[in-house]
Amino acid sequence: MIVELPAHPEYQPPGSFAGPDHPMRKLTRAMAFGEPWTSHDAERVATIFDGLAAEWSERHVDLTKAAPVLDAIERGRPPLDASWIELGSGTGAGTRLLDGLARQQISVDLSEQMLAHAPSGLAPKVRADSSRLPFAADSADVILLINMLLFPNEVDRVLRPGGHVVWVNTLGDQTPIHLLPADVAVALPGDWIGVASQAGTGLWAVLERG
Ligand SMILES: C[S@@+](CC[C@H](N)C(=O)[O-])C[C@H]1O[C@@H](n2cnc3c(N)ncnc32)[C@H](O)[C@@H]1O
């Protein structure tokens, strides 16, 4: 069961951006609900984000993006004295926010250029495909995904028993890579409980195995 908390007092609904027919929305649902992710998909997505990296590093790290992440940490209460792995870390919005909060963090992304534009010295940067992570089973306490595709089986494998998933869409249901918290809980293997809410212009959920 996911308990929906009241929206943060400063929450503002996002403007119209990416509706259900957006190609990334379709890809996000397909990956979450078991369609195969091919090397062609990985190359295509890496190429897209390689091309966006320079602009992304200048325009996409802002307070509005921070608001749902920080609210998830404050009210969702994932453990901070813990090892975090962020999937799809991009140019480092999450990395910067977690620095000094999480005991340990690793930033993972498929795109070489997104990682190249991410800050150095805050967290190890790992170029990897989140459908095949180079980490041992049960090696993360918390997995963070900000506007990132969900590969449920890999999240399940790498997250230790009792671990937490932090899911953030910074434009709520207008985010190109979007799933509702309830859909995330259904897509992940096993039973999940947690809390969800809205902050900034986004939504978040902090889930743990029930
Ligand atoms: C929409 S961007 C979000 C970046 C960052 N989290 C942010 O909010 O600024 C999605 C990121 O996920 C990465 N990504 C997409 N598919 C991936 C995969 N299979 N494995 C790892 N990273 C992936 C992309 O390269 C991109 O950096």
Image: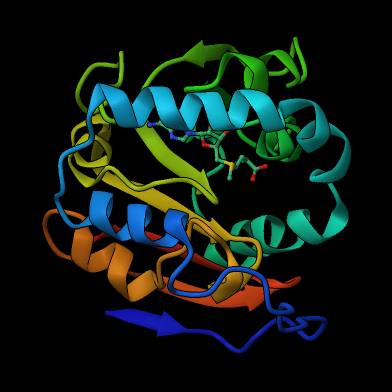
**Residue at 18% across / 57% down in the picture?**
33
Q: Is residue 78 above or below residue 10?
A: above
- In depth, the one of 177 and 1 nearer the eye is 177
Q: Position of residue 116 (x, y in %)?
A: 70, 13
What residue is rendered at 54% in x and 51% in y?
A: 147
Location of residue 95 in the rendering, given as x and y in whole percent from the top left corner: 68, 31
The quarter of the displayed image where residue 210 is located = bottom left
Give percent across and percent down for residue 167. 47, 56
The quarter of the picture where residue 120 lies is top right
Residue depicted at 75% across the width and 10% down the height: 121
Which image quarter holds the N terminus? bottom left
The percent coordinates of residue 29 (x first, y second) are 30, 60
Residue 21 falls in which quadrant of the image? bottom left
Q: Which residue is drawn at 88% across and 35% down?
A: 58
Q: Is 33 on the left or on the right of 54, as rendered? A: left
Asked whether, in this view, residue 100 is left or right of residue 152, the answer is right
Comparing 46 with 9, the one in front is 46
Q: Nearer the viewer, residue 122 or 65?
A: 65
Q: Can residue 84 be seen in this view?
A: no
Check the image and report above or below for 26 versus 16.
above
Residue 117 visible in rendering: yes
